[in-house]
Amino acid sequence: MKVAIIDDEEVACRLIKRVLDAEGFEVEYFLTGHSFLQRLSRETFPIVFIDLHLPDMNGMEILTHVKKRFEDTEAIIITGHASIETAVDAIKAGAYHYITKPFKRHDVRLLANKARKKIDLLVENRALRLALGQGGTITGFVGSSPAMQEVFAMIKKVAMVNCNVLLQAETGTGKQMAARAIHSLSPRKDNAFIAFNCGGFAEELIASELFGHEKGAYTGATATKIGLLESAAGGTVFLDEIGEMPLSMQVKLLHVLQERQIFRVGGTKAIDLDIRIIAATNKDLKKEVESGSFREDLFYRLNVVTIRLPKLTERKDDIPLLITHFIEKFRLAFSKDTRQISPQALDILLHYHFPGNVRELENIIQRAVALAEGESIQVRDLPADLRKLAFTTFEGEDLLSLETMEKQHISKVLDITGNNRKLSSEILGIPLTTLWRRMKKYGLSK
């Protein structure tokens, strides 16, 4: 990373250059403001050290010029103790920090490395946002992996075709998000999107919710109720966990798909429907048909186009992108400074199998951001079961206790020395009596 120093004291310039050269920076120094500005017209410097008092111009003028042309350049102001107030004004004008003369090598090194870290993070975040923009072309989704690009392409194609869609996906992979994306990209986008989970409800409740009921249809039906299917006129209905729907209700849904009509519970008048059905399941509906748990005719009505959403373990390339996305989401929600994840914590998440998929990752990052101290999520901020992943294996073998390692090492030394205890004690660096006690303890005395 290139650094420019603008100071009329060459001794100060050489000192800063020597310190930063050792840190791997590429340093140039300038004794006047004009010579620096001429160079700046041909070169970019991500970090600049600017003396406030120069013979040919004011350091604040240079700062203003630099920040106007290169907003991301980090400026460190060089000043004397008497001008600290001016240095503070420079920070308000966009400088990163200031350093007072006579300065210490440690302060120069620390400020330059902090500025470099800030710039690196900015570049990394921009690259990630670019990846999010390229991969996350479907609202709500984050991903640039080939598996997700295939899903995005399918969603875009099927959105414009007025056909039923079946989403085959595990819990936590974004089924409802995919259904909403299809709706929002379709000609129906200005009308209602209604979601209903078919699992865990009695048949009577499902019928009442989907089809509505007439007044007096059953005890407690004191008024006519419009069902979800009817209220979604012109829009999209998302039926999640369709594999859990009772067989008797499957018959009624099949009638809706065939005739595009419904009857409210207790009603005798057919109501025409203009809706699109998107269904989702984590079951293998073909096997459910074979076992008699799902109607074959309904399966083929729903399965005009099938989109399979990949598990998180099938799109591991997206995990860093998702983590960045969730950190930013919860950083803002919790008003925290957390902006990144440590390499050790990231490595644990990359090796985790995520049975709960993206939803589980989101919950893990939410917890981690809430607990994190400082700018980075650390291993200690992860759930206990994940932290254990860092310690359960070592190069494919179980970690050994100190006693086991000591026993094995003593045994190995004894074997090498032909059971020569004096030589073994010298190699091990312990008294002969201590070796004898260890041999007795570990059953090696014979």
Image (tube, rainbow, N blue to C red):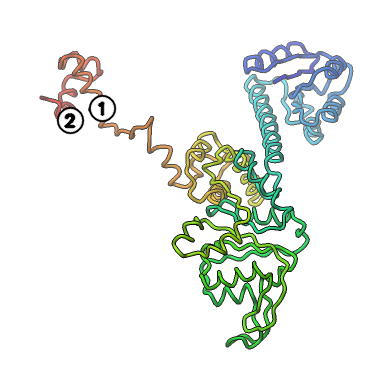
Type of residue at label 1? Glu
**Amino acid type, mark 2:** Tyr
Q: Position of residue 5 (x, y in %)?
A: 76, 18
**Residue 291, picture quadrant:** bottom left
Q: Secondary structure at mark 2?
A: loop
Q: Quadrant of residue 35?
A: top right
- Left or right? Give the position of 147 relative to 15: left
Residue 170 image position (x, y, % from top left)? 53, 53
Q: Where residue 282 sits in the image (x, y, percent)?
A: 52, 56
Q: Which mark is residue 406?
A: 1
Pointer 2 local density, CA inside 10 Å: few below 14, some 14–19, many at least 20: some
Q: Which numbered disc covers residue 442? A: 2
Closer to the camera in the image, 370 or 177: 177
Judge by depth and name the residue closer to the eye, 385 or 351. Answer: 351
Examine the rendered structure and indicate whether residue 60 appears above or below residue 203: above
Q: Secondary structure at mark 1?
A: helix
Q: Residue at x 73, y 30 (%)?
A: 97
